[in-house]
Image (cartoon, helix red, strand yellow):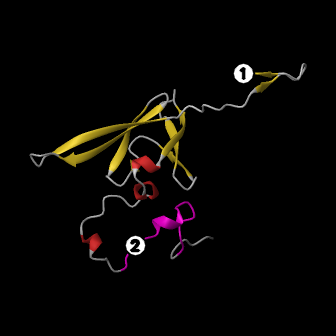
Amino acid sequence: MYNPVGKRDPFRGLFMETGGGARSEESSAPEVCAEPLCRFDLGDLTVVAVVSGDANPLAMVEDKTGVGHLVRRNTKIGRQGGKVTQILRDCIVVTSFVSGPDGKAQPNKENMCVKSDVRSAPVLDLLGGKDFQ
């Protein structure tokens, strides 16, 4: 019989295992997010694909190193403490809260859309051997 006591959960990422340890001076404030997507600015992430038309739509974003991450609604994303609030047909909406001039938290919505590929591969006619564009 398998005993999981003292063993790492195989379904969690290696970077999620950051429990305990001494805290640095910079991290004395409460940590907003410990997920891998919170290490990137929203400008460093690119929406690659969106799967909509389902009760639980999902999207894939790619970071600047080329690693893809799946996101759903309420996934925390970005250094500003944002989260995915909507997944549309070709965009995701990330909402973060920033403090306004009066000190109150104001929602800041940012759309991240799939970039259309301008250079698509030409279609090849297999019978005639001609390229179509």
Q: Which quadrant of the rendered structure holds the C terminus?
A: top right
**Is 63 positioned to the left or the right of 26 in the image?**
right
> Most prominent secondary structure in the magenta stretch?
loop
Q: Which residues are magenta?
A: 7-21
Give the residue drawn at x 51%, y 74%.
5
Q: Residue furthest right?
A: 127
User: Residue at (56%, 31%) from the top-left corner?
Assistant: 116
Residue 31 x %, y % = 30, 63
Q: x, y percentage for residue 39?
A: 42, 59
Residue 1: x, y in percent? 63, 70
Viewer-proximal residue, 69 or 111? 111
Residue for badge 2: 19
Q: Circle 1 is placed at which residue position?
A: 133
Q: How many marks?
A: 2
Q: How far is mark 1 from mark 2, CA to CA?
A: 54 Å
Q: Amino acid at mark 1?
A: Gln
Amino acid type at image mark 2:
Gly
Viewer-nearest of discs 1 and 2: 1
User: Residue at coordinates 53% horizontally, 67% vertically from top-left?
Assistant: 14
Question: In terms of secondary structure, where does tag 1 sit?
Answer: loop
